Image (cartoon, rainbow, N blue to C red):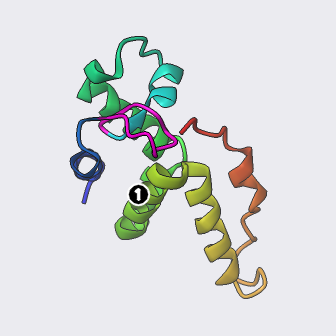
């Protein structure tokens, strides 16, 4: 599955506009919170937040910035899971999960140098 299909899947699941009182994210459209939309320059009413801008945010913030596109070159299914986890929990959390898994499978650094888990926290946090 390529990134366009992954994004379409997320947008399909998330639906259109929502402002549920129990949702800490506040107003959302296409699964993008108002805070994320504002952080990326959208100033209008979330009911009119364009799908194209949501697609661009998903691609830039949840796919390219954490490097999941590079993971997809070797392991597309893992990259898809990282993307989905990143959308739900933040890309820095997803990257941290990957780093911990790789380090756990690394046999004490005998296969390759451990990936510092702190690298995930060095990634600029995404407003959710």
Q: Residue furthest top?
A: 43
The residue closer to the viewer here, 61 or 51, is 51
Most extreme residue toward the bottom is 107
Please tell me whether mark 1 sits on a helix, a strand or a loop.
Answer: helix
Magenta stretch contains residue 91: no
Identify whether 79 is placed above or below 10: below
In the image, is 28 to the left or to the right of 100? left
Count of marks placed on residues:
1
Q: Residue at x 39, y 36 (%)?
A: 32
Relative depth, front residue between 102 and 25: 25
- Image coordinates of residue 106 in percent, x first then y, are 68, 82
- Chief SS of the magenta region: loop
Residue 13: percent from left, percent from top: 25, 52
Magenta segment, which residues?
18-30
Identify the residue at horizontal 24%, vertical 52% (top origin): 9
Query: Mark 1: few, some, or many residues within 10 Å (few <14, many ≥20)?
Result: many
The picture places residue 7, in percent across and down from the top left corner, at: 29, 46
- In the picture, the quarter occupied by the N terminus is bottom left
Q: Is residue 115 left or right of residue 78?
A: right
Residue 66 picture location, percent across and down: 55, 47
Taking the image as shown, residue 111 lies to the left or right of residue 55, namely: right
Say which residue label 1 marks.
Answer: 84
Q: Is residue 13 above or below residue 43?
A: below
**Measuring 28% from the left and 53% from the top, which residue is drawn there?**
6
Which quadrant of the view contains residue 116?
A: bottom right
Residue 28 magenta-drawn? yes
Residue sitting nearer the eye, 58 or 112: 58
Q: Residue lying at the far front in this picture: please name it.
A: 21
Give me the residue at 35% from left, 15% from top: 45
């Amino acid at each position: 599955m390529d990134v366009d299909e992954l994004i379409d899947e997320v947008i399909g699941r998330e639906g259109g506009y929502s402002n549920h009182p129990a949702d800490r994210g506040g107003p959302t459209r296409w699964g993008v919170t108002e805070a994320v939309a504002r952080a990326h320059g959208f100033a209008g009413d979330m009911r009119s937040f364009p799908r194209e801008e949501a697609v661009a945010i998903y691609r830039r913030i949840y796919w390219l910035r954490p490097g999941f596109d590079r993971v997809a070159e070797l392991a597309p299914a893992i990259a898809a899971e990282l993307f989905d986890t990143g959308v739900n929990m933040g890309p820095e959390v997803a990257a941290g999960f990957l780093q911990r898994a790789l380090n756990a499978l690394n046999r004490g650094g005998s296969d390759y140098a451990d990936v510092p888990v702190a690298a995930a926290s060095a990634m600029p946090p995404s407003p959710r």
